[in-house]
Amino acid sequence: MKKVPMATDKKKDIRALSIENLRQFFVDHRDKAFRGNQVYQWLWQKGIHDFDGMTNLSIATRSLLKDYFVINHIDIDHQQKSSDGTLKNAVKLHDGLVVESVLIPTASRTTACVSSQVGCSLDCHFCATAKIKRMRNLNADEIYDQVVAMNQQSKYYYERSLSNIVFMGMGEPLMNYNNLIKTIDKITQPEGLGMSPSRITVSTSGIPKMIRKMADDQVRFGLAVSLHSARQNVRAEIMPFSDKFPLEELADAIQYWYEKTSQMVTYEYVVWKGINDQNEDIDALVDFCKKTPCKVNLITYNPIGEDKFLQAAPDRISAYEVALTENRITATVRRSRGKDIDAACGQLANKAKV
């Protein structure tokens, strides 16, 4: 007879186990394999953080789980609401570190802006998160928990489920690729939230190798690239890491993405006074956009206290929009949400206003 494994003092986070691992755990403990499916559903579809909440399991089974496992989970440590309805969460992790997530409502949908790292691996000068050194990557369950929490908030405050998810919060998602993909798998599978991949967008500052990997992995979610300049010298000045990833290499990776996925990329583009608001900047962006089918979001700048970065004049943003439209490139001017609570793009830096 097979010996039943003994519990140890060091308990494992149960959400690190796959459904196959869970099924095997119960078989090893002389129970039915389908118990693993039940537990998996509680963890990922229902978002339960307490074994006692798994009410279709016997008390003995719940005690068994407590003997071997813990459920490390996030807590919403603090919440702020903007005058425009945007919600910002200070998300406390199991080790005491904090990240931020943002729920953005409109008349017809709610979008969750999700963080993937504590701090950021990159060094974009205009971004508040980049001023926090990267402390660690988030685990897949910590990323997933943000989505579950904001789905609950969406239902409570706006009486509808989340309609979209964007990985545009703290951190560079492609520098935490494995956990990013695990999270999206959980979000999209029927045993999880069952959301369509078409409602998910991953935003990157532009890591060519990882964009190619996503294409090879045949992912089905959308891609956005924070471009901000199509001139290499300007981009390298405001995003120093991009010296290692020249625009030509980035353009080739995006072309590869399009050929493999047939999905149009979205370029995120902030226009700053005296940095990228000249006609040559506009011409460079138009030329870059012609390489691969795309659309452009022209984003208003959200100040982070850096005098160097100032919002460009409205006529310069209009000049971008006109030039792109004349070249049959879809361009939309995006007005940022949640500025009054530092919840807008580039402002996430764990600065709670109480």
Image (tube, rainbow, N blue to C red):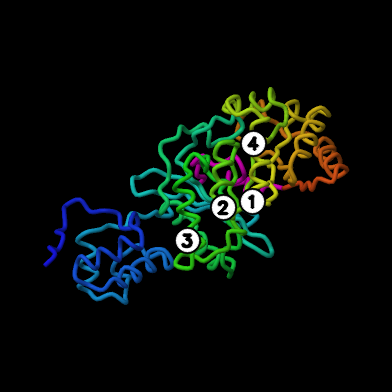
Q: Whole-Å distance between the Cαs marked 3 and 2?
A: 22 Å
Say whether marks 2 and 4 touch (CB < 8 Å): no
Give x and y (percent) for residue 60: 20, 73
Amino acid carrying label 2: it is: Val
| Quadrant placement of the N terminus | bottom left
User: Label 4: which residue?
Assistant: 303
Q: Is residue 123 left or right of residue 15?
A: right
Question: Tag 2 or tag 3, which sits nearer the N-term?
Answer: 3
**Mark 4 touches mark 1? (CB < 8 Å):** no
Of mark 4 and mark 1, the one earlier in the sequence is 1
| Residue 351 lies within the magenta run | yes
| Residue segment shown in magenta | 335-354
Residue 228 highlighted magenta (yes or no): no
CA distance separating discs 2 and 1 = 8 Å
Q: 242 or 98, which lies in front?
A: 242
**Residue position for label 3:** 148
Could you tell me if the residues under marks 2 and 1 are in contact, i.e. CB atoms within 8 Å?
Answer: yes
The secondary structure that most of the magenta stretch takes on is loop
Residue situated in front as seen by the camera: 175 or 129: 175
Sequence-first tag of 2 and 1 = 2
Query: In the rendered structure, which amino acid carries the disc numbered 4?
Result: Pro
> Mark 2 — residue?
219
Image mark for residue 261? 1
List x then y, in percent, for residue 151: 52, 63
| Element class at badge 2 | loop
Q: In this view, does 264 lie to the left or right of 70?
A: right
Cα distance in 3D space between marks 1 and 3: 28 Å
Precedes in sequence: disc 1 or disc 3:
3
Sequence-earlier tag: 3 or 4: 3
Neighbour class for label 3 at 10 Å: few (<14), some, many (≥20)? many
Secondary element at tag 1: helix
Where is residue 87? Give x, y as percent: 56, 55
